[in-house]
Image (cartoon, grey):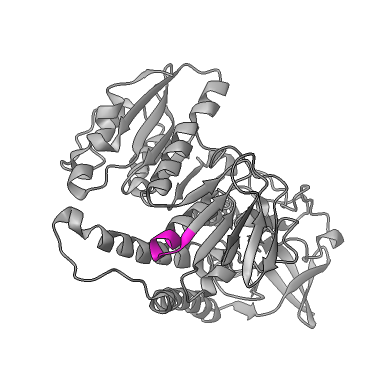
Amino acid sequence: MEHYDATIIGTGQAGPSLAARCAQEGLKTAVVERHLFGGTCVNTGCTPTKTLVASARAAYMARRMDDFGVDIEGSVSVDMEKVKARKDGIVKESTEGVENWLKSTENLTVYEEHARFEEPKVLSVGDKQIKADNIFINVGGRAFVPPGFEEVNYLTNTSIMELDEVPEHLIIVGGGYIGLEFGQMYRRFGSEVTIIELGDHLLPKEDEDVSEAIQVILEDEGVNFRFNAKCIGGKNEDGQVVVDVNCENGPPTIKGSHLLLATGRRPNTDDLGLENTSVRTDDRGYIQVDDQLKTTADGIWALGDCNGEGAFTHTAYNDFEIVAANLFDDNPRRLSDRIMCYGLYIDPTLGRVGMTEAQAKESDRNVLIGKRPMSRIARAKEKGETKGFMKVLVDTDTEKILGAAILGIEGDEIIHSIIDIMYADEPYTTIRDAVHIHPTVSELIPTMLENLEPL
């Protein structure tokens, strides 16, 4: 039985960097990958979806050329085979880059097999067994498929990546981040799109003004919504997909050419043999970790989507940074130091950090709020991108920023000026008094902060 100092299971965003660091530190290291190098982000998440979003935006802007005084002869059409080929090329480069990096790293052995715990420190890797003093689980997650769709042809965020045609009518179950991104994307490609949501509004974790603004943006582009869906399920009928909606208003069923299930994610922990260890999971299968990403088993850590502490590429990479800092750098970084931030990649994008209004109200703090529409920004007008708004929440007593939302052109980039102020633990007056470049979208942030009102 081969014995390693460190073994990493999975090559998502945290795994490769940690494997390379362990090997660099002189540890005899192994990394195990059962399928595609790079994990969700590179293969079926950020890289391919944002590549498709870019193609969809190009089609959208081409149709808007008249708004800018530019004439295009003929209609705008989308060649999905070319769109997919572009996406596949970018994904291939990223995936092969991760694979080549790992296989060329000294002191690092790569196993292309499925790993499973046989004992607390013993893994079966294909038909072999290996032993490791320290094991790092980085197995990611996959799409959750709700009951009621067992007998229907459906797509997930993974399988939809293989489409090389524009669906005539794409039905999406789930009004969350994945469903909204694909919904706008395929509407811009030319599909009729209907999004079915169990609740009475989109994105229940966001503030209502954010949810409502996003709904208006997508409806303006022709995306259809059905809310308050109950007892949903699906069936195949005459080459079409029929989805039961049973909403209070509107037809009880929706018929379409394709069905995308975007109803959440589940961790890839059910086939790891965790029952042969003392690693604990919650009732959804997420591995429980402490503030340093240690599990309940000695010498075993969990990083990335499988620990339920972020489910984003950037949080997974930060998991690696926390583990490496504690193991090798005598730097006691902690999970609790992280300020939650993320983006929603509809167009225009939503950049988010920290608390929502609802969370601020529940915190019993004295809170100030600033809010400005994108239509008040000269740069947004010049670019023809005036949809959305920005808002910020400030603690009255400490003058620290509690959270912010920027829904608008380049909102995912602009939000970082606020994120950095929050990490620096500086008062909001630091950015309020800063001089920003004109004309930019970011220049409205100091103006917004000069006009705060009680929440």
Residue shown at 62%/79% (left/top)? 110
Q: Quadrant of the N terminus?
A: bottom right
Q: Position of residue 24 (x, y in %)?
A: 53, 69
Instruction: Left or right? Give the position of 237 relative to 360.
Output: right
Is 186 one of the magenta-colored residues?
yes
Q: Position of residue 447 (x, y in %)?
A: 24, 28
Judge whether residue 140 can be spotted in this image. Answer: no
Magenta residues (range): 185-192
Position of residue 431 relative to residue 168, above or below, is above
Single out the residue that lies furthest toward the left.
69
- The residue closer to the viewer here, 355 or 110, is 355
Position of residue 131 relative to residue 427, above or below, is below
- The residue closer to the viewer here, 171 or 416, is 171
Residue shown at 28%/38% (left/top)? 374
The majority secondary structure of the magenta stretch comes to helix
Q: Position of residue 151 (x, y in %)?
A: 74, 66
